[in-house]
Image (tube, grey):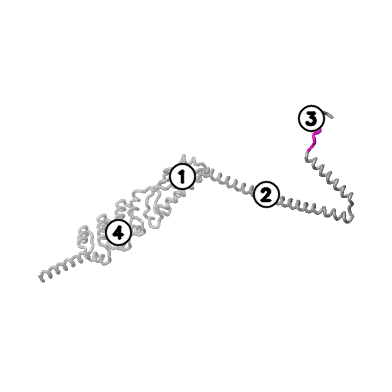
Amino acid sequence: MTALIGSVFVVALVIIAISIFLHFVPLGLWISALAAGVNVGIFTLVGMRLRRVPPGNIVLPLIKANKAGLAVNVNQLEAHYLAGGNVDRVIDALIAAHRAEIPLPFERSAAIDLAGRNVLEAVQMSVNPKVIETSFVSAVAKNGIELKVKARVTVRANIDRLVGGAGEATILARVGEGIVTTVGSTDDHKEVLANPDHISRTVLTKGLDSGTAFEILSIDIADVDVGRNIGAELMTDQAEAEKRIAQAKAEERRAMAVAQEQEMRAFTQEMQAKVVEAQADVPKALAVALKEGRMGVMDYYNMNNVLADTQMRETIAKAGPVDLTPKADEPKK
């Protein structure tokens, strides 16, 4: 029984040892590389394990590149992997560029991949140009009519400028700016509606792809819609603003007139109060004059007669002319 347990223990140790050996020494991958004609040493694969580099991520792309006739080696692929790159995508891009006869060395392809761009997509775009569409760009002609223009831009990737070149957003922004400038310099919006290709020709001559990772092949106007009459709206807003200014000034003048009227009314009331006060002093002055003998009784009666006569005349003047013509039913005297 003890011998049986010892035999099982030995077998388990052997299996564990073989598993550890096969983990650090990928014999199957080494045999595949030899069968594909790729010279990869067994100690190189062990070194990849020690450097925590999956050998399959290096050897399989290397076999693919060797079959495609590319001159790449293990050190290049391992260095790119350790730098955080995608080895398999770089090899696919190199194969696609090689088949399309596009000059693309490994170092540039690795630099494009490490820059965060999809190098395989860039190569495919170099072979098959991509169409990007702008949103509706609002532009106003000189006659004040708004036009909404949508354009389709056909671009091809420029591999030499993929590192450090601007992306699709810059292309779309520049095309939108060109559309606004072209429409804004047109006297009548009908000219744009009649010849929309004038926009694409004008925009293409501006060299919008300079400094970008793309080459613009064509700009096609997909749609042109007539929008609002911006000029009329601006004139309406200006007239409304002038109307409000005039109303404000009129209200200011009315307020000043009301203030002056109130001021004159207060002045009149003040003067009337002074007159009443002065009239209240008249009897006192007459009494003093009679008492001191500066005025006689007959003078006082004459003055009252003059005042009564004056009051009568004022009453008659207010009543108007008296009609003295006898009426038909009255007998003549």
The C terminus, quarter of image: top right
Packing grade of label 4 (10 A; few <14, some 14-19, many >=20) is many
Packing grade of label 3 (10 A; few <14, some 14-19, many >=20) is few
Residue tagged by mark 3? Answer: 327
Is 160 drawn above or below residue 150 in the view shown?
A: below
Evaluate if marks 4 and 1 touch, with contact meaning CB atoms under 8 Å apart.
Answer: no
- Between 188 and 16, the one lying in front of the other is 16
Q: CA distance from mark 2 to mark 1?
A: 53 Å
Mark earlier in primary sequence (4, 1): 4
Q: Amino acid at mark 4?
A: Val
Q: Which numbered marker is on residue 148?
A: 1
Is 223 drawn above or below residue 168 in the view shown?
A: above
Q: Amino acid at mark 3?
A: Lys
Residue tagged by mark 2? Answer: 258
Residue 309: percent from the left, percent from the top? 84, 44
Q: Nearer the viewer, mark 1 or mark 3?
A: 3
Residue tagged by mark 4? Answer: 87
* Secondary structure state at the residue bearing disc 1: strand
* Secondary structure state at the residue bearing disc 2: helix
